[in-house]
Image (cartoon, rainbow, N blue to C red):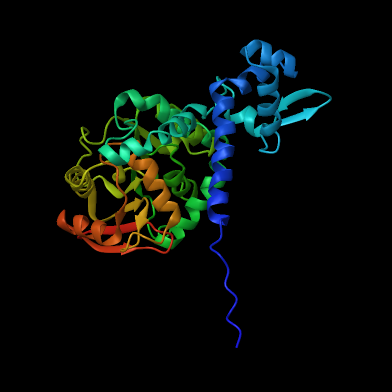
Amino acid sequence: MSKPETHPPSLGVIDEVDTVGLKVAVLKTAMELNVFTTIAKGHGTLEEIATVLRCSMRGMRVLLDALCPLGLLDKADGTYTLTPTAEAYLVEGAPTYCGDIYLMWFQGRERFADCVRTGKPAIDLTVPEAEDLWVSYTAPYLLLWPELAETARARWEAVGVSAETLPGAQILDIACGCGVKSFVLAQADPTACVTANDSPKILEVTATIASAMGIAGQVKYQPGDVKALDLGTEQFDMVLLGNILHYFPPDQMQTILRKAHQALKPGGLVVIDDGVLDEERGAAEDVLLAAVEMVNSAPYAEFHTFSEYKEILEKVGFIQVTLHRTRPVSARKKS
C-alpha cells in the first residue's frame, strides 16, 4: 500500500510578505528622495531627476521603473509622469497630500522590534505636536469622502440609526477627523445638527468637506482635546467616538465615556466605531495588523474586545450594549 503523498510546507505566505515589503521599500525610498514632488515641478527624464536629486543614474532608473507597475508613475518616450494617485497624494503642497503620515508609518515600522522589546512606541501620535501628521492622514478625504460616505451609511443602517429613528438629532462627533461618518446623518436629515470635535487644523479640513457635502449650515465646531473639554449635560441625542478610544488607557477611556454619558440626553445613544477584536484576539486580521501600527505610534494604544467595551460602558452607566455586524458598538443612556 502506497503512502499518501505529502507536500513540504509552502513558502507562499513568506514570499507574499516579502513582496509587499519590497513594494514598501520602493515607495518609501521615492518619498524620502522627494521623487514625486521633483517630477511635479517639471523634471521628467531620468537624467533630470537623477541630477536634481543628486542620485546615481543606475539607481534612479531602477527606482523609477519600479514605481511604474505600482501605479505611481507612467513612462513614455523616456519621460516619467505622475499618475493621478501620485499627483493627488504624494506631491508636497497638494491639498490632499498624505505623504507625511505614510512616511512616518514606514519609518516607524523599522523600529517595531524596539517597540516590542521596550513597550515604547516609535512615535507618539497623541501629543499636540503630531497634529500635522493627523492633517496628512485626514487630507485625502477631501477627494475620498463620497466613498467613505457609502461605507458610513451602511454602518448606520446596521446600527439602526436614521432620520426616521433619530429625527432632528443633535450629534456630537468626538475626534471627528474628516467628519463624514456623522455628516451622512445630517445629509439625510436637514433638521439634524453635528458638533464636530477635533484639533483646529483638522477641523479646517472637516469644514471643507462639510461644505462639499452641502451641510455647512448644520455643523458646529468644537476644537480641543476631548480629555480637557466640557461636553455639557444632556445636550446630545447621540455621541460618536470613531477611531479614538483605542489611543487611551482604560482609566482615560472611562473618563471620556463618562463625559459622553453626561452629555447625552436620557435615552441617548453612544456609538463606538473602532477596531473590535474577537474574544480570542485571533480572527480579525485587519484589526490585528492595525494593532501593530497602534502600539508603535502611541504609548497606550490598544484595541479591545466587545466584552472589554461592554464592561467599561456598563461601569459608567450605559445599558443595552450591542456589537453590530459591521463592528460598531452601541449603548444607551437610561431614559
Q: As drawn, which residue projects farthest toward the front? A: 1
Tell me if 120 is positioned left or right of 284 in this view: left
Relative vertical location of residue 267 with respect to residue 77 in this rendering, above or below: below
The number of discs equals 0
Relative vertical location of residue 22 with respect to residue 168 in this rendering, above or below: above
Tell me if 271 is positioned left or right of 50 in this view: left
Let me know if residue 38 appears in the view. Answer: yes
Tell me if 168 is positioned left or right of 152 in this view: left
Let me know if residue 163 appears in the view. Answer: no
Q: Quadrant of the N terminus?
A: bottom right
Please provide percent x and percent y for residue 115: 31, 37
Q: Name the residue located 67 percent from the left edge and 11 percent from the top edge.
A: 51
Tell me if 272 is positioned left or right of 46 in this view: left
Please provide percent x and percent y for residue 85: 64, 34
Please provide percent x and percent y for residue 123: 34, 30
Q: As drawn, which residue projects farthest toward the right? A: 77
Q: For this rendering, which residue is in front, 78 or 37? A: 78
Q: Name the residue located 66 percent from the left edge and 23 percent from the top edge.
A: 59
Q: Quadrant of the C terminus?
A: bottom left
Q: Name the residue located 48 percent from the left edge and 47 percent from the top edge.
A: 184
Q: For this rendering, which residue is in front, 173 or 62? A: 62
Q: Name the residue located 57 percent from the left edge and 50 percent from the top edge.
A: 16
Please provide percent x and percent y for residue 224: 29, 29
